[in-house]
Amino acid sequence: MKLAESTAALLPESIRDDFPILAQTVHGDKQLVFLDSAASSQRPRQVIDAIVRCYEHEYANVHRGIHVLSERATDGYELARRKAQEFLGAEHAHEVIFTAGTTASINTVARSWGDANVGAGDEILLTPMEHHSNLVPWFQLADRTGAVIKHLPMTDDGRLEVDRLGEFLTTKTKLFAFTAVSNTLGTVNPVAKLCRQARAAGVVTLVDAAQSAPHLPTDVRAWDCDFLALSGHKMCGPSGVGLLYGREALLDAMPPFLGGGSMINRVYDDHFTPADLPGKFEAGTPPIAPAIALGAAIDYLQSIGLDRIHAHEQALVAHAWERLSAIEGIRLLGPSPIEHGPDIRAGLVSFVLDRPHSHDIAQLLDNEGVAVRAGHHCTQPLHDRLGITASTRASFYLYNTLAEVDALAEALTTVRDRFKPTGRKRRPREA
Ligand code: PMP
């Protein structure tokens, strides 16, 4: 997509006024350019207000109290669940579990579903582009059970080899867990296609939606996935809350993972009976205000429209791709939106420069007010596959602008120029 064609998709810059944190200068007089939303997004005033409103007017523990504040908090908490249900396209509200985030959601499935359904010699299919939180819980499950880890291969430019999925869905495969959007490559995977093929082979699917749910529409029924995990803090909500979607029949059959208050129906001297869904998976006091604020974040994102947010970010990525690829010595990671079209990518661009190192780049960009992330982004096996140890990632959201992409490109050009090889040979030291 050429810049001229895509600018029509940009959201109005007035959206930035909703995000008070963005209107600041750092390091003296440098305007903050926040390009680290894939790690954690910022929150609009509407979400901050919802948190304040909760603590000022409707906070108490949920579900148990027979008093006004507890009823208000319970109503707010359950309303947030229904908003999440609608956001995900789930059939039932009780298929939506509040967790602490994507990591907690995936671990819940690995422990509850995994321990009950996966045994020695069974196969768990993953991909080379998974975040550590969609790897380590499965490695731990394999350690506990003797299951075998497999990976669907990907191309050198970071696209899953979808045509080879059939080879990897064997009679031993129990689960296919994959990310909808890579947090390092930016690749958008064909979720519905992957789930359909897995279902036809009788394989359960788990979609890591941490990087897709904030940026493009989610539809668990159209995707036909069995489980889906996301984090509130990446989608304008607070940290400390996330969602686990599970198909009703699977959740019903799964034993609870965490034990304690709220997840029980009845406790006896030496045993208990679990609560119905969703309580069975929400042991202890849940993240009450964060869940209510996540509901406000969902309202906010839906008032703008996930399709529009995605189109906005595609325009930013197209521009970033054009600008950054012109920098000498740069390697952009992930599939090219010019070669494969804008739908192949979500709103982030990771890169390596021949010099300096990613961490130095991030430090030097920060000096100019440009916040990016450097390191392995919790995708070490992916970095190994790409033959690099670290990369720098610029990630965009609905509040970023073309001017900010330009600021990144200009700051990066300056950094690269500073570290450019001079071609001059060092004179040998005199003895
Ligand atoms: N999966 C992906 C693709 C992610 O980007 C992240 C966060 N970087 C996670 C999982 C883990 O999310 P959290 O730390 O919120 O649990």
Image: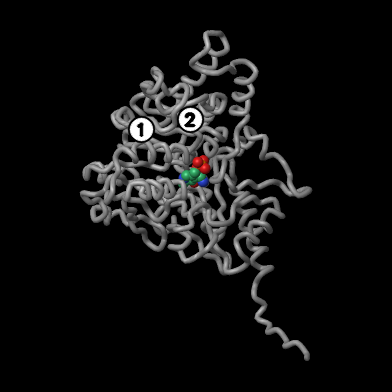
Q: Examine the image and state in which quarter residue 399 appears.
A: top right
Ligand 1 under 8 Å from disc 1 Cβ: no
Q: Residues within 10 Å of mark 2 (few under 14, many from 20)?
A: some
In the image: residue 172, left or right of residue 282: left
Badge 1 amino acid: Gly
Which residue is disc 1 drawn over? 246
Residue 224, percent from left and from top:
30, 37
User: In this orientation, does residue 342 appear?
Assistant: no
The one nearer the camera, 280 or 156, is: 280
Amino acid under disc 2: Gln
Marked residue nearer the N-terminal end (2 or 1): 1
Residue at left offset 57%, top offset 57%: 375
Q: Quadrant of residue 382?
A: bottom left
Tell me the residue at 55%/8% (across/down): 67
Q: Secondary structure at mark 1?
A: strand
The image shows residue 16, relative to residue 357, as above or below, that is above
Image coordinates for residue 99, horizontal then vertical, percent: 47, 32
Give 430 or 209, whichever is nearer the viewer. 430
**Is residue 255 at all visible to an observer of this figure?**
yes
Q: Residue at x 50, y 47 (%)?
A: 347
Within 10 Å of disc 1 (Cα), the crowding (few <14, some 14-19, many 20+) is many
The disc placed on residue 223 is none
- The disc placed on residue 302 is 2
What's the residue at 40%, 59% (across, down)?
339
Quarter of the picture containing the C terminus is bottom right
Is the residue under label 1 in contact with that under label 2 (CB below 8 Å)? no
